[in-house]
Image (cartoon, grey):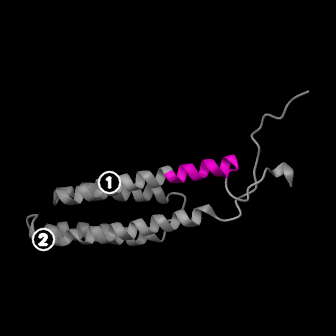
């Protein structure tokens, strides 16, 4: 007689838990976009002047962040957000304050990654509201 050692399967949650997380991720990107755009006057006045290279770099990052806001439902969204943080940290060559912004928001994105992993664990364990083992149905 063999026992069924497979992990129990659960019904999906009654409410989409990823919807709220996608909103938090998009909102974080918008807040970060505002902060990055506020770096333009800092680089212009304090950081040796705004050149085509530094302004173009910050502008390119800003456009990438706006585009990334609409891609938060994709499976690779968190990796994209983390890559944007690396690009912002590299922007520290223009002024150190840009790198500081990148490090601060990198910590925020790492925490969001932790939350995402925790939600997935709860789904897998059937601990979200409305989930039941499939064999109860």
Q: Position of residue 51 (x, y in %)?
A: 13, 70
Q: Position of residue 26 (x, y in %)?
A: 45, 68
Residue that badge 2 annotates: 44
* N-term mark: 2 or 1: 2
Disc 2 versus disc 1: distance between alpha carbons?
A: 22 Å
Residue 125, position as x, y percentages in the image = 68, 46
Q: How many residues crowd around disc 2 within 10 Å: few (fewer than 14), some, or many (20 or more)?
A: some
Secondary structure beneath label 1: helix
- Residue in the picture at 39% in, 55% down: 108
- The residue wearing badge 1 is 86
Q: From where the camera sits, is residue 84 visible?
A: yes
Please determine whether, in this image, residue 128 is positioned above or below residue 22.
Answer: above
Name the residue rendered at 46%, 64% in the picture. Answer: 25
- Quick check: is 11 in the magenta stretch? no
58 or 4: which is nearer to us? 4
Residue 64 visible here: no
Residue 111 vs residue 79, the one in the foreground? 111
Name which residue lies at 43% across and 58% down.
Answer: 80
């Amino acid at each position: 007689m063999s026992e069924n050692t497979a992990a129990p399967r659960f019904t999906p949650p009654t409410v989409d838990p990823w919807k709220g997380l996608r909103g938090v991720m998009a909102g974080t990107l918008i807040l970060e976009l505002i902060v990055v755009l506020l770096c333009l006057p800092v680089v212009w006045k304090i950081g040796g002047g705004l050149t085509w290279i530094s302004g173009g770099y910050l502008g390119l990052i800003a456009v990438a962040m706006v585009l990334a806001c609409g891609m938060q439902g994709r499976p690779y969204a968190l990796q994209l957000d983390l890559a944007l943080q690396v690009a912002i940290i590299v922007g520290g060559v223009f002024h150190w304050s840009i790198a500081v912004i990148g490090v601060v928001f990198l910590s925020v994105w790492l925490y969001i990654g932790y939350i995402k992993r925790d939600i997935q664990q709860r789904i897998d364990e059937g601990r979200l509201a409305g989930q039941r083992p499939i064999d109860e149905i």
